[in-house]
Image (cartoon, rainbow, N blue to C red):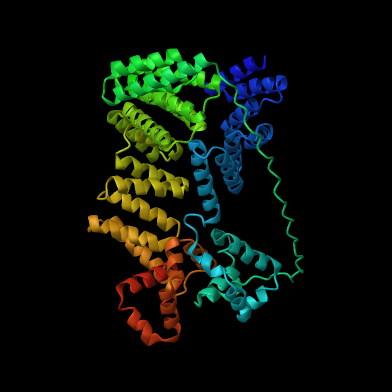
Amino acid sequence: MAEEAKARGNTAFSAGRFEEAIRHFSEAIDLAPTNHVLYSNRSAAYASLNRYAEALADARKTVELKPDWSKGYSRLGAAYLGLGSADEAVAAYEKGLGLDPSNEALESGIADARAAAARSRAPPPGASPFGKIFHGPDLWVKLTADPTTRGYLQQPDFVRMIQDVQKNPNNINLYLSDQRMMQVLGVLLNVKMRAPTNEMERDFPEPEPAKPQPEPAKKSPEPVPEPEPMHVSEEEKGARERKAEAQKEKEAGNVAYKKKDFETAIQHYTRAIELDDGDISFLTNRAAVYLEMGKCEDCIKDCDKAVERGRELHSDFKMIARALTRKGTALVKLAKCSKDFEPAIETFQKALTEHRNPDTLKKLNDAERAKKELEQQEYFDPKIADEEREKGNELFKQQKYPEAVKHYTEAIKRNPNDPRVYSNRAACYTKLGAMPEGLKDAEKCIELDPSFSKGYTRKGAIQFCMKEYDKALETYQEGLKHDPNNQELMDGVRRCVEQINKTNRGEISPEELKERQAKAMQDPEIQNILSDPIMRQVLIDFQENPRAAQEHLKNPQVMHKIQKLVSAGIVQMR
């Protein structure tokens, strides 16, 4: 009864019906609670549904029942990795490799786990350049020495803010609107940043003594049960002879395959299958021959048999993954339209749940890319795209912007290479106040046709509305390189220069200046300039050594960076 329930679970798992597979495996476990294979299979099903906590519990039970079975540690490592416990995953894979040093699945798993562990210790991509200035013993010394920030140290929320940035430098963007953080940056960078006005200073309550939080005691690792010796039953003499003969046939088939003598290879592999049906590699090899011959249907049949038989024999999941990958390759060759790629993609995904092989992953990505390209080709129709664009234009004139967006979106689907549609939809988004979406469309418009002036006017207008006058100025100037006499671009340059000059003359409100500075400090380019030791010295010379500052301005790169800070409102030139 347990074997029947397990077989039903294997069939459901192979078909991707993981919830059903879990029910069957649970039924089998109720009937045979000491069968380690059942817990292993159910762990794989839970992991396929991203239910890693349940997968971990079953994986632990597997190694408890059969500590000398390497596949149990593979399940354990996969569950830990799914839960984000990369170090525990590495330890589990290492135990499995101790039992089976040549197991490729364990080697692949431990490589993934080590990579995940390294990523968890490394700073995230695009980490703030300010992160390093918040580390080291000098931080608190500098803040204590400065008369302004010294008072902040008595405020608990200020200390928590600094500690949060120390833990995760990217969180600095959350606090840039706080004037105290601007003061801290000025102290740490040794730059006297212009405060909007004294009225911007905030009143903070008197500090409350913070209670130290005791660190939780570390748990000692649980002892790993000693592996028990594996007992291998003796086989009958006749069965051993048939297996040996089958291996000879397989080797002969391999030789014929290398010589491109496919018919002979098929004969040898078929004879091997007849002699020994307990080795699915004979089926996968014959499937490979069928694939080379272009007999994709025969290849798929052999792969399905290999998967089914492999489940029954509890074969190495790497072998099952190989059969599924080969089936997916055959399905790709048979694909004639975008929908035909769906079963191939599903098959590759199943193969990856068995064994994460780089070749399979590449085939999956290629199939998904081919499916997407075919979908676009099947939907591509420039005539309908123009009709949808005209409908959008009419609705735009009627100020029905949401409806216009729908038609422009349909036009893009029909012809994604027309820059005019992206420009028109960017205008709609601007009217709706959806600035990030509009900016993205304007940039796509420029990407498709760098000489199309409307792309630059759309992008510049959006940046101007977002009060990013320095970026808007750069956009307008770039557009003028392609269309020097465009009046709309020239007007945009004039408006940006007026706004930047207002900032330099102090003619904007303190709130607006504060907002502009906070937004500019989130710009990675501004952050890199201010964290550059050379530029920090240049800014100090501007305050303390005007003669040296004049020498710095002769360097075009330095001059460009200074102009960037001035345009962003960070530095003022008087």
Q: Is residue 483 visible?
A: no
User: Could you tell me residue 437's position as x and y percent?
Assistant: 44, 46
State the quadrant of the N terminus: top right
**x and y percentages locating residue 446 in the rendered image:** 31, 49
Q: Which of 459/314 is in front?
A: 314
- Residue at image coords 40%, 25%: 326
Residue at x 43% of width, y 15% of height: 273
Residue 54 image offset from top left, x and y in percent: 66, 34
Quarter of the rendering containing residue 5: top right
Q: Nearer the viewer, residue 31 or 232?
A: 232
State which quadrant residue 496 falls in. Answer: bottom left
Q: Residue at x 52, y 52 (%)?
A: 118
Q: Is residue 31 left or right of residue 81?
A: right
Q: Quadrant of residue 228?
A: top right
Residue 21 in view in this figure: yes
Left or right: residue 33 versus residue 165 is right
Quadrant position of the C terminus in the picture: bottom left
| Residue lying furthest front | 237
